[in-house]
Image (tube, grey):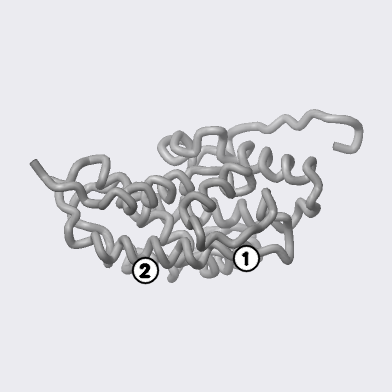
Amino acid sequence: MSNPLFKREERAFAQLIAALCYTNPFSKQRVDLEKQALGDRYSAVSDAWSLGPGHHNKNLLPLTELTRTLLVNSHKRVTADTPSDDRMLYGGLLRFWLFYRFNDDLLSLSAQSLRAGFKDQRVPLYAKFRAALRELHPSCDVGLPEPAHLFALLFQLRRAFERIHQTIIGASQPARALRSRLWQSVFSHDMRRYERTLFDRMHEMPTLILGPSGT
């Protein structure tokens, strides 16, 4: 019988990080998960930390550092004999770290694609991304999509976050709720399903917005 990949405290942290990967970033659940993951290292922020331009989440740096450390310490011990649950948790850690490792690069790519009118273009960043993925990806399955699919997903997440973050401004509860609902309207209530089957089909789906005149 194979040994568990993580100690109890490490497993608890990995489970929270894996949950963060699929949590609406504009929801209170996101904040709650960050609090649990960081414990005493958590920096108090609003109950909806992303309030629009000028607001930054101070907890991302320690979350990313802790995730990177756990990846490095466990990377060489992940094999096909590692319990499936542990391998999937490792994949969640890797996904989270890659997103924030390339956070600024993905934002720049989003701006470039907007200026280019979203036309087909070469993406040099992908080679850099794939090299970083290869560095920490074990030889066995850890539940991640193939590299190009994963890169496209992370790009879509970063682009959507920035559009919502920059255009829906305000700290009121209705504004916070609108940001959260807009995110869900893009990625549905089940981001795992979006990842599996919807990530390249959203342009085919009509959107109906209801509300008072002016909505």
Residue 65 versus residue 196 in the image, above or below = below
- Tell me the residue at 46%/59% (across/down): 99
Report the front residue among 18 and 193: 18
- Tell me the residue at 32%/48% (across/down): 11
Q: Position of residue 141 (x, y in %)?
A: 23, 47
Left/right placement of residue 191 relative to residue 163 reads: left
Farthest residue, direction left: 1
Q: Please indicate, yes or no, whether residue 146 appears anywhere in the rendered image.
A: no
Write down the residue under mark 1. 111
Left/right placement of residue 89 relative to residue 96 reads: left
Report the front residue among 30 and 99: 30
Q: Secondary structure at mark 1?
A: helix
- Residue 127 circle label: 2
**Number of residues whose C-alpha sits closer than 10 Å to that of mark 1, classed few (under 14), some (14–19) or many (20 or more):** some
Q: Quadrant of the C terminus?
A: top right
Left/right placement of residue 128 relative to residue 27 reads: left
Q: Using the numbered discs, state the Cα–Cα distance from disc 2 to disc 1 in whole angstroms.
A: 19 Å
Report the front residue among 64 and 91: 64
- Tell me the residue at 65%/65% (across/down): 115
Q: Please indicate, yes or no, whether residue 168 appears anywhere in the rendered image.
A: yes
Q: Position of residue 45 (x, y in %)?
A: 66, 58
Residue type highlighted by circle 1 = Ala
Q: Position of residue 32 (x, y in %)?
A: 56, 46
Q: Residue 184, located in which quarter of the rendered image?
A: top right
Earlier sequence position, callout 2 versus callout 1: 1
Q: Position of residue 136 (x, y in %)?
A: 28, 63
